[in-house]
Structures are given as structure tokens and as C-alpha cells.
């Protein structure tokens, strides 16, 4: 469970999540990954852990982002099955038993939580999310379930496969379907955030879309090639138009056509350079090989020192 500044939501989340997990009849842990929260979230997590020994606290040294927190949780979880879920209760934890039953009955490695109704989202959020999933399915293929976010169940085999992937900035919405493991779906209605404010504003949504596209497809580079060809064709047509106009003696000082042509060519060049820059920047980041996050504290290490199971 990635957590960032969720002091209002955490008590409500624990109150709703714990009875569900206790009722499963299996050993479990809840890996709460504190992504460098600056409010009372760390204190609340410590208080919750006093009465809830299954709660495990992993705290980052600084804020590293939602996908990094997901990575830390997936990589450090001990379970035979791992479920990722946000702390805002927009994804109902009541679906976790259904996910587990489906995985066991049909021997599945992945069970996606698919949003059947996004009526609680704003008009803008619904349509931008729809555009995102449409674009990702065009780039990645229909392996990616439509309207499936980061609420999913993974088997230990799927977790081990993800841990072996050399992704520097993984986007699990695309990476998990790419594995091709046997999968199923559980449909649910997306609820309103239980408390607090969204941690995914427009800027982070755009960043996620860019990460998804550039991490998983070279299509933007091919788009740059096609834009270059299109600009070349437009320039040829302008040249033909200018020649014909000169032949009929109807040429006038054409500053407007020249101005538009130069703007078009310059814009295409800047787009191409920008796309190349995105990929070069990622190559530079990968060559640096800096870790995506630093774990400042893991309560499981304290338990091991104390001899706890």
C-alpha cells in the first residue's frame, strides 16, 4: 500500500481493511510504504502497528513517487500472493477475497481490478483516463485490460518475474500485462476518496502517460520520422505552388506563406528534438543506475532482530 500524506484516510482504511484480511483465514502482512510523508502519517502508522502486528512499515528517506513505492512494496513483500491497493479506499478492499478465490480456483498468476464505473470521477478525469487507456492499448496491444489501474493481485511467480525485470522506472499498468501470465479480472465500482485530497494531479497524470509511452514503445520516434516526412511534403507543395504562381505572373511578396512554412518546419524540428531528448534522458538515467528509492526504515528488520516470526 503506497502511502503519502494520508493522515485523514489511514485510520479509516485500517478500520475497513483489517476485518477483511482477518476473515481470510490465512497468514498475511500489510506492507505500508510511506513515501516520505510530511504530515502525521508516520505517527499514525506507528500507532496502528501497536494494535495491528500484521502491519509492516517501510519508510522512504524521501518522496520518490507512487510507482517507486509500489516497487518497494512488491519487492519486499513475503506473501505467496501480493495485492497492491491505494490508501484512499477508491479501490474497495472487499474485492481482495474475491481476487484470491479467483486466483486459486483458476490457477491464475494475475487478477486485475477493473473499474466498471467511474461515476465518482470528474468529467475531466474520466475522459483523460479513457484517452490514456485507449492510447496504451494501441501501443501495447489488447493484453492491457481496459480501465485496470494499480489494484491487482500477483502470485509469487509473477512477483519474482517483476523483480527480475531491469526496469529503471517501471510502469506496472503496462509491465504486468506484458508478462503474459494467466490472468483474470474482478470488476468493481470506483468509489470516492474516503478523505484527504488526490495525490495524482494533472502534472503527475501527464508524467505517467509520458513514462508509459517512452518506457514501452518506440512509436514516438517513428512519429518524429513521419512528421519530418510530412514537413518535407508540405515544403515540396509550397515550392510547386510558388513556381506555378511565378509562371502566371501572380507572385506578390509572400511573407505570410513563408512565415507559416518556417513556423511549421521549426515546430516539427522541435517536436522531433523533444522526443529524442525524452529517450536520451532515459538512457542517461539508466546509465547512472541510481536506485529509484532509498528505504530509511523497515519494521520487518526490527521484528527479525527481536526474534519475531
Image (cartoon, grey):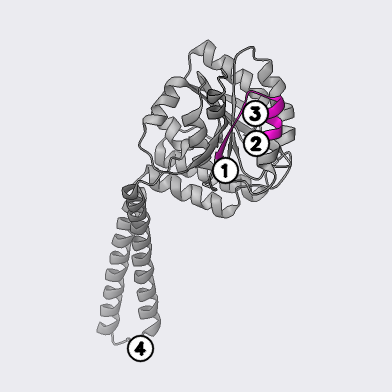
| Residue 138 position in % (x across, y down) | 43, 41
Is there a contact, CB below 8 Å, between mark 2 and mark 1? no
Task: Identify the image quadrant of residue 203.
Answer: bottom right
Neighbours of disc 4 within 10 Å: few (<14), some (14-19), many (20+): few
Residue occupying image coordinates x 31% and y 73%: 238
Q: CA distance from mark 2 to mark 4?
A: 64 Å
Viewer-proximal residue among 275 and 304: 304
Q: CA distance from mark 3 to mark 1?
A: 27 Å
| Residue 189 position in % (x across, y down) | 67, 31
Region rendered in magenta: 46-59
Which of pointers 1 and 4 indicates the residue nearer the eye?
1
Residue occupying image coordinates x 35% and y 80%: 258
Neighbours of disc 3 within 10 Å: few (<14), some (14-19), many (20+): some
Q: Secondary structure at mark 1?
A: loop
Q: Secondary structure at mark 3?
A: strand
| Residue 55 position in % (x across, y down) | 63, 27
Pick whichever of labels 1 and 4 is earlier in the sequence.
Answer: 1
Amino acid at each position: 500500500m503506497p502511502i503519502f500524506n494520508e493522515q485523514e484516510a489511514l485510520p479509516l482504511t485500517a478500520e475497513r481493511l483489517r476485518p477483511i484480511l482477518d476473515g481470510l483465514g490465512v497468514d498475511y502482512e500489510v506492507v505500508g510504504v510511506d513515501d516520505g510523508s510530511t504530515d502525521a502519517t508516520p505517527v499514525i502508522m506507528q500507532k496502528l502497528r501497536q494494535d495491528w502486528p500484521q502491519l509492516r512499515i517501510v519508510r522512504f528517506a524521501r518522496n520518490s513517487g507512487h510507482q517507486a513505492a509500489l516497487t518497494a512494496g512488491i519487492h519486499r513483500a513475503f506473501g505467496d500472493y501480493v495485492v497492491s491497493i491505494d490508501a484512499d479506499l477508491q479501490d474497495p478492499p472487499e474485492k481482495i477475497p474475491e481476487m484470491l478465490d479467483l486466483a486459486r480456483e483458476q490457477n491464475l498468476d494475475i487478477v486485475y481490478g477493473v473499474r466498471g464505473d467511474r461515476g465518482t470521477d470528474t468529467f475531466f478525469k474520466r475522459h483523460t483516463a479513457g484517452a490514456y487507456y485507449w492510447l496504451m492499448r494501441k501501443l501495447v496491444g489488447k493484453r492491457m485490460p481496459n480501465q485496470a489501474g494499480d489494484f491487482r493481485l500477483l502470485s509469487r511467480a509473477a512477483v519474482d518475474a517483476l523483480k527480475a525485470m531491469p526496469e529503471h522506472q517501471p510502469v506496472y499498468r503496462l509491465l504486468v500485462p506484458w508478462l503474459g501470465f494467466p490472468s483474470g479480472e474482478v470488476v468493481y465500482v470506483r468509489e470516492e476518496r474516503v478523505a484527504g485530497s488526490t495525490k495524482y494531479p494533472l502534472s503527475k497524470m501527464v508524467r505517467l502517460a509520458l513514462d508509459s509511452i517512452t518506457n514501452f514503445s518506440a512509436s514516438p520516434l517513428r512519429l518524429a520520422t513521419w512528421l519530418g516526412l510530412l514537413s518535407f511534403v508540405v515544403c515540396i507543395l509550397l515550392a510547386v505552388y510558388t513556381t506555378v504562381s511565378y509562371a502566371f505572373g501572380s507572385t506578390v511578396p509572400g511573407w505570410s506563406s513563408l512565415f507559416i512554412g518556417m513556423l511549421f518546419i521549426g515546430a516539427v524540428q522541435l517536436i522531433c528534438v523533444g522526443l529524442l531528448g525524452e529517450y536520451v534522458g532515459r538512457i542517461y538515467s539508466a546509465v547512472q543506475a541510481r536506485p529509484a528509492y532509498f528505504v530509511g526504515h523497515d519494521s520487518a528488520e526490527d521484528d527479525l532482530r527481536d526474534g519475531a516470526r
